[in-house]
Amino acid sequence: MNTSESSQIEISYTRPKFWHRIIANLIDILLFALMFFILFISVRAIVQTTSEYKKNNELLIQIRLDSGLYIDSSTMGITDVITYNSRLDFAGSVRVNNAKEAIDSFLSYAEEVCDEEKALEIINSYDQCRLDNRFVDKLGQPYFIEDEVGTVIKNPNCSATNQQYFDNFYTYYIDEVLQGYLVTAIPHYLECTRFMSDMLIYIELPISYLLAGILIYYVPTFIFRRGRKTFGKAIYHIGLIDSRYLNPTQARSFSRFAIFYFSELILSLFTLGIPYIISFSMMAFSKTKQSFPDYLLGLYEIDTSKNNIYNSYAEIEISKLDNSKKPIDFKMRDLP
């Protein structure tokens, strides 16, 4: 390395072992996942204390209970009727009766809160679904038939058990049909669920993800300044040097974090980890063994257990001085 036209400094660096780099990266990933989980719980708890969130959550709960499709259980909390009735201590006949009560409650609730046309559509869907030719027993007998006056009733010739009625028809009708009407037809329900999902997608997840990335991949570079190390790389003595073979500046360290965060951590969420795979492949198989951010910024990983990382050429020159000689003894001799 040339520091001027008249002087030269010679220094050699050693690449870290590949498996050290792998484990160091895995440690950082695990720390990131743990930090993200902790931050997500914390951010979510803060969001849930806001007045707007409480108002929407209370309204959502009230609509669910009024609809009859949810039950406030002392053991399971607010639970949909299918999950609640799937408990092992319920007989098939009890599950069917509870499902019928839930359907009747929802149809009555729809008549109260929906316009006449939508309410009629929901009510008619019950008969239409019961007469669907998909719901037949092993002998081909339908689950439901129409009597002489056109009323839909349970088919007395059907061999299906109550449990089969519950599993095959009532579970489908409540989970697929009525839950769909709950979201699309019941006033204010969609607005409440959209607010909750927006808070999750645009507030809770992004803030947790960003803070976890900063705390695991950027903050440690202030702690381990020489080599700009993360926690995993500090454990395995892996540091960074720039194209001058010196310690990277904080600006370049921030650039590295920004490129890594947006090109790998963010894009990998939407592309099945492809950017991270590409960066890993570059680190494993390229001639210079650089990851994608390091390649763009001209950074290299070295083994700091065998090499020092210097902040300047002057620091290198000072370290090369011969300090092995004994200092001069300036003590005065005893006078006679």
Image (spheres, rainbow, N blue to C red):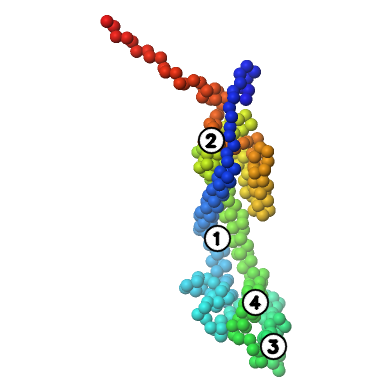
Q: Nearer the viewer, mark 4 or mark 2?
A: 2
Q: Amino acid at mark 3?
A: Leu
Q: In front of the other: label 1 or label 4?
A: 4
Residue 40 - label: none
- Residue 335 visible in the picture: yes
According to the picture, the residue beneath numbered tag 4 turns out to be 172
Residue picked out by circle 1: 53
Residue 324 in the image, given as x and y percentages of width and height? 45, 21
Q: For marks 1 and 3, give the one nearer the viewer.
A: 3
Query: The N terminus is located in which quarter?
Result: top right
Q: Amino acid at mark 2?
A: Thr
Residue type, label 4: Tyr
Is there CB contact under 8 Å for labels 3 and 4?
A: no
The answer to whether residue 32 is visible is no
Residue with the mark numbered 3: 139
Crowd around label 3: few <14 · some 14–19 · many ≥20 (10 Å)? few
Foreground: disc 3 or disc 4: 3
Gap between marks 3 and 2 measured at Cα: 76 Å
Task: Rate crowding at label 4 as few (under 14), some (14 to 19) or many (20 or more) other CA atoms within 10 Å.
Answer: some
Disc 3 on helix, strand or loop?
loop
Nearer the camera: disc 2 or disc 1: 2
Q: Residue at x 58, y 54 (%)?
A: 205
Q: Residue furthest right?
A: 133
Q: Which mark is residue 304?
A: 2
Give the x, y percent position of residue 195.
61, 61
Which of the two labelled residues, at mark 3 and mark 2, occupies the earlier sequence position? 3
